[in-house]
Amino acid sequence: MSLLDVWIVVVTILFFAGTVLFAIGCDRMQGGKR
Amino acid sequence: MPDWLTGSALIQWALLSVVLLLSAKPLGTFLFRVFTGERTFLHPVVRPLEAGIYRLTGVREKEEMTWVGYLLASLAFSVPGLLLTFLIERSQSLHGSFFNPQHLPNVPAILAWNTAASFTTNTNWQNYGGESTMSYLTQMAGLATHNFMSAATGIAWAVALVRGLALRSSRSIGSFWVDLVRTIVYVLLPICIIYGLFLVWQGVPDNFDAYTIAHTVEGATQTIAQGPVASQEAIKLLGTNGGGFFNANSAHPFENPTPLTNFIEMLSIILIGSGLVYMFGKWVGNTKQGWSIWAAMFILFSLGFFVAVGAEQKGNTLIASQAHTAVVAGVPGQPSSYRGSYQAPSDAYQPGGNMEGKEVRFGIIDSALFATITTDASCGAINAWHESMMPIGGLVPLVNMATGEVIFGGVGAGLYGMLMYAILAVFIAGLMVGRTPEYLGKKIESFEIKMASIALLIGPANILIFTAIAVLGVWGTNQIENAGPHGLSEILYLYTSSNANNGSAFGGLTSNSNWFNWSGGFAMLIGRFAFVTPLIAIAGSMARKRTMKESLGTFPTDGPTFTILLVFVIIIVAALTFFPVYSLGPIIEQLLLNAHKTF
């Protein structure tokens, strides 16, 4: 394992964290319709 | 009958279409019973397995999820899968002689990440040759396992959207874990067991032997690669994954040995996608809703096939004109008016049309049909070289993928993509008649349109921005083999295929580079997860709504008018978004070819 491997794992997790934020953003767009 | 259309092409298209049509209802009914938890003929055997998995994993079968919970569960399932595949690839040197008899080294880091992202997203883009890069353990535990998991994830998302459309006043859209498990144990595994045995019967190997060294009659030596092929091949096609065990994919005789396997492979790519559409109609209580979408898919499939086979059958006009000149000059050969008995050749020098890049066993018709189907769905398996298709022939796979592969589509992905277009179609129809749009008795409001618009824009942005960056500098242009519009098509195809999670390669591009491994990997992840997020949001929003009674202003979505509207919405929205870049790529290439200029 190298630094590049670690970097790849971090980048992957960051991407999915971004997707989660995107989903939360979409949920917020529904406004008061809960 | 015109030169470009033959009886053989019509028969192949008709046979496949009839089998697909006949299978839709029984398969769709079976899928409906599976996902609604009704008893099926597999229950005596499979139900104990399903219940055992729930007990083992702590999944509560009755517990349902909101759309956010459903999506997060699918992400929580995909992230470790991606990282585990990455780890398996990076540790090949530890796999031992049984699982790595060729002693293949660890996969380089960036290639390993690209491959892991590729298989997690159901893309199966391959920047490597399977037989020369991946150990048997990687092929099975990393790649074939993901073929099941990613396909099941896609189907689960589609089921969630269908459930959202069918439910009334509900906050939940089902359980991701239950949908996932049911897809695998009731649908994918049983079919793949039978399918794999069928492939073995037809001559596809499935073993753990080291590669065979053969001595040819000429005294040369040849390495014959083999391995656990049949088991991976079955899910490769059924799950619309497309990643071949061998670099040559379904053009390889060990992956696709006979005309029968070729037919079954094509059928199996769109089989589940077709069945899911019927399931949708049944679930919403009106099978005509499903058939109207099925018909739109069938029209688009047929259009694509006849354009592709026409372009390929007609062949290269440049070669045809040179051949004619050669005949006039007295070079031995057949006159240009020669016609074969079962295929219409352009001339004696390219009998049957454009055979470049085609596997001779399959010829033009089966290659064009396979190319159309594999890009209608998000499969990406190939039995011919797409780059060698005529420019207009190669445009068909590009357009198919640019639609979001909604023509039967990837397992699950096709249906949820098509339902996005259906929502847009009723919105447009609503604008035309000046009423609030409705779909399946539910009002389509601003939130649904916002989400559908976001989903619709993600694809073109993903494809065009990455393509634009790639053609700006040496990181992209150094890797292309051909100059001019063909070179642009090579890059455009990569990102279109990656975004659509197709995985078929155009070819002519050295995509195993740092830039293409990174950018292609992200294009796949965005095309999968960013695209599906707003669609699952629509599922959640639609599930909460109450249904209304039909009124005079309701636009009927279960008849031919809706089918035609849907077809035009797809063509206008998807195809015209990309028209400028197509005119710089395959369209101008065809025009220049007509003027005897090639690249």
Image (cartoon, coloured by chain):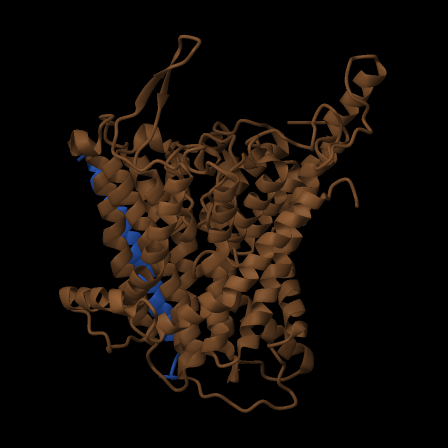
Chain colours: A blue, B brown
Asked whether the viewer can see residue B583, the reply is no
Instruction: Give the farthest residue toward the right.
Output: B328
Q: Is residue B156 above or below residue B446?
A: above
The residue at 24%/27% (across/down) is B105
Q: Is residue B389 left or right of residue B520?
A: right
User: Which residue does the image show at 60% across and 77% down from the upper left?
Assistant: B557
Name the image quarter holding the C terminus of chain B.
Answer: top right
- Left/right placement of residue B322 relative to residue B36 reads right
Residue B6 appearing in the image = yes
Q: Is B116 situated above or below B363?
A: below
**Percent x, y of residue B195:** 39, 50
Front-most of residues B289 and B506: B289
Q: Residue at x 58, y 39 (%)?
A: B367
Location of residue B356 in the rendering, given as x and y in whole percent from the top left corner? 61, 29
**Residue lying furthest front:** B201
- Residue B67 figure quarter: bottom left
Residue found 38% across the figure and 31% down from its top: B129
Q: Image height check: is B236 above or below B332?
A: below
| Total numbered badges shown on the rendered structure | 0
Judge by depth and name the residue closer to the eye, B189 or B466. B189
Is residue B327 shown left or right of residue B272?
right
Q: State left or right for residue B58 relative to residue B314.
A: left
- Where does residue B91 sit, x and y in percent of width and height? 19, 35
Q: Camera-side residue: B366 or B246?
A: B366
Q: In the image shown, does B463 or B360 lie closer to the viewer? A: B360
Q: Position of residue B303 (x, y in %)?
A: 66, 53
